[in-house]
Image: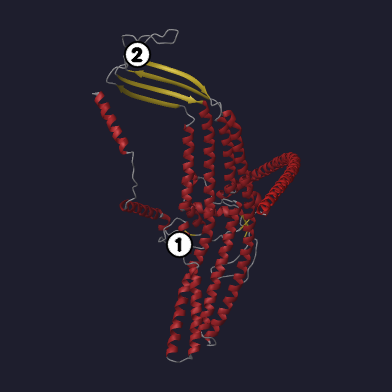
Amino acid sequence: MLKKLAKISLILSLGALISCAKRSPEPITVDVISESVKGDLAKINEVKEKNNLLKQGLKVDLYTAIALAVENNKDLKVKIFETALSNKKIEDVEFDMLPAMSANAGYTGSDRYKATTSATVPSNDKAGAMGSTHSTSRDREVNEQDIGFSWNVLDFGLSYIRAGQSSDRYLISRELERKTASNIKRDVVRAYWNALSADKLIKRYDPLLVKVNKALNDSQKIQELLLQKPMDALLYQKELLDIQRALQSQKQSFVNAKIELKSLMGLLPNEKFTLVETDLPLNELNMKLEDMENYALVNRSELMENRYEERISIAETKAGIRSLLPGLNFNASWTSSSNDYLVNKTNFEYGSSVGANLFNVFRAPIIKEINERNTQIIKERRLALSMAVLSQVHISNIEYQMALEEYETAQRYYEVSRKITEQVRNAQKIARFGELELIREEASLLVAELRRDIAYSRVQFSIAQVYTSVGIDVTHLESNRRSDIGTKEYAQIIKNNFKFSGEKYKLDLDISGNKANKNRRIVDRDVGKPQTKEEKKLAREQKKRAKEEAKKAKKLAKEQKKQARLKAKQDEKLALEKAKRDKKLALQEKKQARLKAKQDKKLAKEKVIRDKKLAIEKRKQARLKAERERKLAKEKAIKDKKLARLKA
């Protein structure tokens, strides 16, 4: 019975292998795509239902918007999932350090016994006659089981290094996550202020556009009734259309601002929320330019990523060298068999072995040189990144100063436009100005207000850009703590981080449009000392972190100086080697020149000798030819004389 089952299973296995030998392309069907779309829409609705804070009428200010973006932004979630995946890979690599444990069980059968015989072999190495009897040591049907254990010391060492590399890759993914969060924070700042301006000004744009359309219709009716000169009416309409076009073009600059903010916060385009003005705009960073440079070199994600890559490269060098060492293997196994011919049907076996590839001796220098050059490339890349980071710090500070100047100009322009509009509105009441002038000035005032708000948004964005370029992470929170607190508490933590990192406000202005200051004032405002327990604790943590970062910066400076000295020594060594090579090459070139001159001289002498021989041979041939010609001439003259005698 077992024999038949084995044959049937063998035939079925062969049939399955044959059927899998060929696989044709299978495009995704419309039904599968439809099901996928339905699933995505269902997940989107789940996201909408989970936004309980929005259902409760949450008022979103700047720091709440940043908190929502960090919690819900899909790009950041992808980075978080990649970080979690890297963490799981560490656990997977750690299993490679464990010994291999295997358990096997099987059945073998045959139609006939595997019978054997033997023959005697004398000293002349020629087999004699085979025996007349046959023997076997195995049943036709045998069940076998075994449990084995093996452990390779070399594999353990390599797996230990690989686990360290996986840990570094996990730390790299965390740095990329931090970089993404910092960029999202910067983009949210710009989108928030643009959306706030859009909410405020969109309510005033539509009534003004209605007033412009009404004035256009009235002018067309006056033109049709011939109550005004045609040219005056057309010029009036042209000015109104210019105003309408300017308003429409300015409206396009912020009409999508709120949707952009929703996208950054991970909300759906049709979700509604209340946007409010923050009571604490971003303030100037409390740090000197030199301190900004040092802080950026220590804390920027790109440089931390490069440092981890350098550590991975150094570990790869160690792994490459260790992989060339001999492998020491320990093994043990317990076996069991149903073969009746065995004396001991169960047995415990153990042993060890050592093996190595002797040609690895020649590979070791090459592997070492390859990894050292890779490490050198990574170091050079870090120096290039350091230069780029320093440039970004300086550029962000320059852009901040330019944004301040731009805002000052926009504020002054708005104040002048507001005064002109008030004058025209008062004069229009006593019929000194027409409706066109009032509409024109109201449109100019609205455009000026929009430009002022855009300039203020650029100021806030440039401050966020300074924070990003320096590498200050105001959104950082441990993953276990992030799940324990709500959005409001997280927004308050971000607000406190900005508050304690800043020094002063460069702008003391109300941008609501109703109570705008008449003059721009630059003041130093005390951001306040920590009052609550949480603020005091946060201040202590930041002070402690600042000390640690200062130590890191000092250590990094020492390391950079050390690397600079090593690089100088290497450059000096390379220069000496190059000078030796150049000197050796010059001697070889001089020697080759002398050899070439000798060869040219020898060839010239040989050519002169050949030319002389050729000239002598030519003269000889010329004499022979002349003698033949004289001889022929004489013979001809004799023949001519004989012929003349015969004729006579």
Report if residue 200 is visible in the image: yes
* Picture quadrant of residue 590: top right
Question: Where is mark 1, residue-wise?
Answer: 259
**Numbered disc 1: secondary structure:** helix
In the rendered image, residue 422, in percent from the top left (x then y), is placed at: 56, 79
* Residue at left offset 43%, top offset 26%: 101
The quarter of the image holding the N terminus is top left
Residue name at image x 39 percent, y 55 percent: 48
* Residue 413 lies in quadrant: bottom right
Could you say where residue 458 lies in the image, as x and y percent from the top left?
A: 57, 63
Compared with residue 10, is residue 392 higher up or lower down, i.e. above or below? below
Q: Residue 342 carries which label?
A: 2
Q: Quadrant of the C terminus?
A: bottom right
Label 2 secondary element: loop
Badge 1 crowding class, 10 Å Cα cut-off, few under 14, some 14 to 19, many 20 or more, is some
For the question of whether residue 476 can be seen, the reply is no
Image: 28 above or below 134: below
Marks 2 and 1 sit apart, C-alpha to C-alpha, by 81 Å
Q: For the image shown, how many numbered marks are present on the structure?
A: 2
Q: Is residue 645 left or right of residue 370?
A: right
Placement of 208 over or under 294, stated as above or below = below
Amino acid type, mark 2:
Leu
